Image (spheres, rainbow, N blue to C red):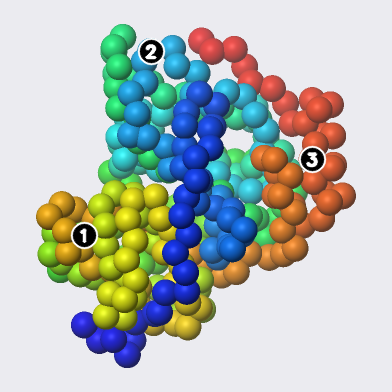
């Protein structure tokens, strides 16, 4: 491995327990030591957990100033929003919603039958650029077969958005950003290229690995490895006996200032208050009844 071209690790951020609707989650972003990695300002890891028919999941709630991305590792997930979009995504696929000026949505796990099923995945948010905070909402479902896939030496790469190791994902990003799921085989290591100007991190979904030059930093499931903004490839090694599952994320730095106000991420307190008022007065719409 060419250590001269590998990015160092800046820090490892542990996730902490939170809840999202009826689901317990582990939250890695935002964190007091790091509010964003590129435009990514939020990362929740849910499951694996058993869900039953009728489980509400995450009920109706608003967003503004961001995009929300739900990537499923197992299970099925239904999206509905106040702009009239609906979609069901299965394992390996993603829901990509642009909240823009404001939208109300809900996400519900869908067991395959009347029994229980295993639900596992991540939800992430990007902060929209200043010029696009008030754009109209939109939605795209990305089926598993649409996600760009490549076999690397010792690993499988699935790119949802942006470009990683020369592979471009299908999602249309509104700012320079990347998102990719990497499975590193037992005993293997990777060094993948992203744009040198991009901030970058690896969230450990499952397993334990070593990161950076000479594998100097170790991290395990539920931890976010933040690479230094020095350019170079992102290195990870799996010395264990089972696969190492990673979500690589990053991009150009988020356009600040970042004002977090519950489900809204804006550039000023005035914008955040205006989004709250728009939601409270019904200007973000409401969800239609479930058919």
Can the viewer see residue 282? yes
Q: Nearer the viewer, residue 12 or 89?
A: 12
Q: In this view, does 5 lie above or below 95?
A: below
Q: Tell me which corner region of the image, top left, top right, bottom left or bottom right, holds residue 59.
A: top right
Mark 3 → mark 1, Cα distance in angstroms: 42 Å
Mark 1 → mark 2, Cα distance in angstroms: 34 Å
Can the viewer see residue 185? no
Residue depicted at x 32% and y 90%: 4
Q: Callout 3: 10 Å neighbours few (<14), some, many (20+)?
A: many
Residue annotated with mark 2: 53
* Count of picture labels: 3
Residue depicted at x 33% and y 19%: 111
Q: What quarter of the picture does the N terminus occupy?
A: bottom left
Q: Callout 1: 10 Å neighbours few (<14), some, many (20+)?
A: many
Residue depicted at x 41% and y 55%: 223
Which one is closest to the eye, mark 2 or mark 3?
Answer: 2
Q: Do the residues labelled 2 and 3 touch (CB within 8 Å)?
A: no
Q: Which mark is residue 184?
A: 1
Q: Is residue 35 left or right of residue 70?
A: right
Q: Tell me which corner region of the image, top left, top right, bottom left or bottom right, holds residue 263.
A: top right
Q: Are marks 3 and 1 in contact (CB under 8 Å)?
A: no
Q: Is residue 119 left or right of residue 2?
A: right
Percent across and percent down for residue 239 are: 17, 64
Q: Is residue 169 above or below residue 114?
A: below
Q: In this view, does 8 lie above or below 211?
A: below
Which one is closest to the eye, mark 3 or mark 1?
Answer: 1
Residue annotated with mark 3: 275
Q: Nearer the viewer, residue 19 or 122?
A: 19
Secondary structure beneath dot 2 equals loop
């Amino acid at each position: 491995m060419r250590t001269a071209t590998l990015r160092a690790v800046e820090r490892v951020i542990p996730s902490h327990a939170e809840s999202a609707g009826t689901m317990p989650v582990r939250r890695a972003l935002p964190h007091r030591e790091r509010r964003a990695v590129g435009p990514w300002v939020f990362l929740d890891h849910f499951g694996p957990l058993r869900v039953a028919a009728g489980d509400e999941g995450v009920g109706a709630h608003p967003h503004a100033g961001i995009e929300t991305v739900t990537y499923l590792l197992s299970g099925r997930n239904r999206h509905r929003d106040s702009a009239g979009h609906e979609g069901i995504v299965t394992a390996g696929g993603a829901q990509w919603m642009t909240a823009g000026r404001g939208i109300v949505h809900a996400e519900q796990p869908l067991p395959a039958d009347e029994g229980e099923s295993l639900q596992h995945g991540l939800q992430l948010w990007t902060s929209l650029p200043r010029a696009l905070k008030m754009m109209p909402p939109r939605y795209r479902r990305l089926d598993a077969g649409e996600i760009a896939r490549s076999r690397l030496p010792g690993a499988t790469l699935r790119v949802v958005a942006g470009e990683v190791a020369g592979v471009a994902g299908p999602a249309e990003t509104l700012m320079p950003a990347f998102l990719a799921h990497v499975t590193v085989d037992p005993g293997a290591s990777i060094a993948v290229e992203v744009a040198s100007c991009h901030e970058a991190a690896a969230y450990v979904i499952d397993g334990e690995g070593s990161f950076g030059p000479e594998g100097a930093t170790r991290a395990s499931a539920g931890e976010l490895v933040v690479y230094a903004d020095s350019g170079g490839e992102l290195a990870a090694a799996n010395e264990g006996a089972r696969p190492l599952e990673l979500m690589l994320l990053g991009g150009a730095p988020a356009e600040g200032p970042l004002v977090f106000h519950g489900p809204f991420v804006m550039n000023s307190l005035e914008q955040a208050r205006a989004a709250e008022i728009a939601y409270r007065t019904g200007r973000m719409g409401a969800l239609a009844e479930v058919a």
